[in-house]
Structures are given as structure tokens and as C-alpha cells.
Amino acid sequence: STTVIWFRRDLRLADNPALVAAVEAARSDGGEVVGLYVLDDALWSAAGANRLAYLTASLRALDAACDGRLVVRRGDPRDAVPAVARTVGAGEVHVAASHEPYGRRRDDAAEAALASTGARLVRTGSAYAVSPGRLRTGAGTPYQVFTPFRGAWLEHGWRAPAPRPREIPWASLRTDDLPDAAPTAERLPRAGEDAARRRWHAFLRDGLAGYGTNRDRPDLAGTSAMSAHLRWGEVHPRTLLADLGRAQAGGAPEADVATYRSELAWREFHADVLHHRPDARSRSLRAVVPDDSWATGATGDTAFETWAAGRTGYPLVDAGMRQLLATGWMHNRVRMVVASFLVKDLHVRWQRGAAHFMAHLVDGDVSQNQLNWQWVAGTGHDAAPYFRVFNPVTQGKKFDPDGDYVRRWVPELRDVAGRAVHEPWKLPSPPEGYPARAVDHAHERRVTLDDFERARR
Ligand code: FAD
């Protein structure tokens, strides 16, 4: 009979075990496969313009890969999915399991609604190499610390990539139009499974050797830029891990391969933490200061807006915030610096910064975003020493040593040569149009450490 593959964050045909299961079930008795995507109003209204524009482009690419047969429905999946199943008389709706708080609730509700049409929701695989919730410590508890999690994750290992089904018998069905979604960023990365594969292969060829050190340099194109592709499942991390294994066997430097694998392990760790603690989406996992001491930060709303616009007077912070607005992406090192600055220099709660990131990031992903913010704020399970406060000037001099990254994103500083760009207040004449420092870093750092100290007593 006809089966449905309900795509959500797995917008690809290669290495997609749920799709393989749907195709096999349909083929077993000569049925067809409906490829379905539901534009869920609950997500559509919450996601920022950049993510929606990217998603729309990715869906167009998926439609092309599905011979133009992708079925799009707008509305609540609890109604839309059973309606499609009923129309085609499907007995099975196949999905990759969701692990985010909203996705789990949605799937449970869709499963119940499908049951009333006589159809089953079949979950195969997830967006991770090892499904969130699978790994436990020796004591049977969820992991709270990254390094042992990574050890267990490596030891557990992962399946080989699933083969891409050939000649899928796509069903032909009425479809809603994809909406036009304009990004706020000036340019977005190319979306879709083919674009993801090309980017990845270019990285394997040109970027993997040296990744371990180059990844910290925002002035270089030293990272893989795979995050949006992974966010939307245009590629599965298992495919990347298999390719990394082959690259290493073919002579790629072991340290660089291990570092990349480790970054993927962070992604899986955060998904695992959120699986066990869905409240981490909005609540601090640890109270390092009373929540209200940040909420009422002395500098308040103006400070937040100054930060969001990239006008704090600290060049590395401003460059990062402007890169985010212009491209929907920010380098990881700079994400850490700007997040630390908002929380520990401007005393604004991490949740506000996380919401701003979610509104602009193309790769915005609730588990990765919220838990990285918690890590920097020091409220996460496995935070860097929570009393660490990033110094935007020394970080700038170290990781953007010639100042190229700052000059790229902060035009007011383009005429300042070299690393002097990180301390414009020391120049004989202040660069025109560039703001003075909103706060004094040394002073605000002290305030934060005093807050921590008081909270500990
Ligand atoms: P690469 O260096 O090439 O890394 C390869 C892949 O490893 C990435 O694509 C990503 O999937 C994973 N990865 C790398 N670093 C991390 C990390 N710190 N945590 C988890 N996974 C990681 N990443 C998101 O995908 N979505 C987010 O919403 C997000 N929000 C963040 C917010 C803050 C405050 C911080 C500090 C980091 C956040 N990150 C987020 C993690 C990281 O910054 C991005 O994944 C990375 O910058 C993406 O660029 P890349 O693909 O070139 O990275």
C-alpha cells in the first residue's frame, strides 16, 4: 500500500533510514510513496526570517530531488498528517524520531491522531549518529559532563550510512505552494542536499588538514560551514563520520580528524542533555547567580540593543554581531565572546541573547543554541569554569591577530591597520562613527565575579 515519508529535519534522500523504511514498505506490495513536508504554523511563526528563507530553498531542492512530487501542506501537523494518510489510504507514516521538546510533543500527538485513521507512525533513526537518550553512565544516569560522554559515544559507534533508494515510486498529490520567504541577511548559504555534499567535499579536500588550529580563527575560512546543512538534515552526521574515517585512513592528519569528530560529539551531547532536560530550553540548569540579578542588570535594555546592533565599542564583539545580521551565521569563537559579553559584561540574562540568536541564525537549533548559551553563561551542566569571563580584546588579538575579521565587518575601522584595530580607544584620534566603549570590561568583570561570590555564600 501507499506509505508516507514525513520529512522534518532530514531534508535529503541519501543516508535516510526512515525513507528507506518507507520505500521498502511501499514496494513490498507495489504501493507508492508520498513525500510530505508540513509547514507548521507553530514553528513558522517562531523561526526567524533567515531560517525560513533557507528552509524554503532547501524544500525546493528536495522537491526537485523528489521528481517535483514533494507534497507541502500548511497547518497543524496533527491535522495535516492524518489528512494526507487518509487521502491516500496509508497504513504507515515514516519519520526520523524527534528529540526536541516541541518535536516530541508534536509526534506523540500526531501518532494518536493517526491511530484514529488506522495508520501507524513508524520512527526510524534520528538526526544524530547516536540517538539522544541512548547513552548512560555506569550508574545508569544521563551524562552531565562532555568528556566522558564523548568517550562513551566513540565507544558506542554508529551504523554505516544507509543506501540512497533508487527510483522511488513517488505518488502524485495536490500540494500547497511554498511561501516566498525573504531573509533579513544580505546573503545566505546555498541550501539543499547537493550543496551540502559539495561544501563537505570541498572541506575534506581543502579545510580538514589544519582544522584543529584554524577553526579558532574567524579571520580565516577555517571551519566547515556545515551547521545549517546539519540543522536541516541535508546531510546526516553519520555520513560525515564515515567520510572522516576514510579520510584518516587515506592519510588526513589524525589530530584534525579527531577534533572535527569531537565537534560533532558536542552537537550530540547537547541534544542528549536537552532530551533529558527539556526545561533547559528556557531555564538555567544551574543557578550560578540568582536569576534576577541578571534580569535587572544595571545597564538594561539599552545595553541589549547596543549589543544586538553591534555598537558596543568592543571591535570583536561588534564584528560578530554584524556578521550575524549580515549573513545569519557567526564564527564559533566569536559566538562565545559575544555571548560572554552580553551576560558577564552587560549583565543581561542568557535567554535574551539566545532569543536574538534564534531570530537570526540560519543554523539556529534549540538544543545547540540554548545549551551553548548556558555553557558560556556558566549555567550549563558542563560549563567552562563558570567564573571565566572572555576578554574581548585579548581574544581579538589572539584569534584575529591582524584584525582582518574586524575590518571586514566594521567599516568604521577599515582604515586602522593591524591589530591596533582591537583597541580603537588607544588611537591618537578616535575613528569617525565608531562608538566609544559602552562599559569598562575590567569593571564589569569584577561586578560579575562579585555577584558569583555573593551567590556562593
Ligand atoms: P565547524 O567548526 O566546521 O564544526 C563542525 C560541526 O560541528 C558544526 O557544523 C556543528 O554541527 C558542530 N559544532 C561545532 N561547534 C559546536 C558547538 N560548540 N556546539 C555544538 N556543535 C558544534 N550551532 C548550531 O548548529 N546551532 C546553533 O543554534 C548554535 N548556537 C550557538 C550559540 C552559541 C552562544 C555558541 C557559543 C555556539 C553555538 N553553536 C550553534 C555552535 C557553533 O558555533 C556552530 O555549530 C558553528 O559555529 C558552526 O559553524 P561550522 O559548521 O563552520 O563549524
Image: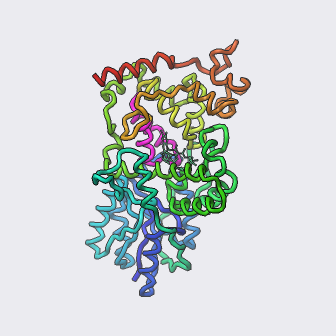
Q: Is residue 368 magenta?
A: yes
The colour scheme used here is rainbow
- Viewer-nearest residue: 147 or 179: 147
Q: Can see residue 41?
A: yes
Q: Position of residue 96 (x, y in %)?
A: 41, 65
Q: Position of residue 144 (x, y in %)?
A: 35, 45
- Viewer-nearest residue: 233 or 77: 233
Marks counted in the figure total 0
Stretch in magenta: 348-375
Q: Position of residue 300 (x, y in %)?
A: 41, 23
Instruction: Identify whether 294 is placed above or below 102.
Output: above
Instruction: Identify whether 338 is placed above or below 331.
Output: above
Q: Please state, as top left, top right, bottom left or bottom right, where the C terminus lies in the image.
A: top left
- Viewer-nearest residue: 41 or 228: 228
Instruction: Identify whether 435 is placed above or below 359.
Output: above
Q: Is residue 350 magenta?
A: yes
- Residue at 54 percent across and 60 percent down: it is 241
Q: Please state, as top left, top right, bottom left or bottom right, where the N terminus lies in the image.
A: bottom left
Farthest-out residue, bottom: 29
| Left or right of residue 290, residue 36 in this image | right
| Left or right of residue 357, residue 314 in this image | right
Q: Position of residue 224 (x, y in %)?
A: 61, 50
- Residue at 41 percent across and 42 percent down: it is 371
Instruction: Identify whether 330 is placed above or below 135.
Output: above
Farthest-out residue, top: 428
| Left or right of residue 128, residue 207 in this image | right
- Residue at 30 percent across and 24 percent down: it is 455
Q: Can see residue 127?
A: no
Q: Quadrant of residue 377?
A: top left
Q: Predominant secondary structure in magenta?
A: helix
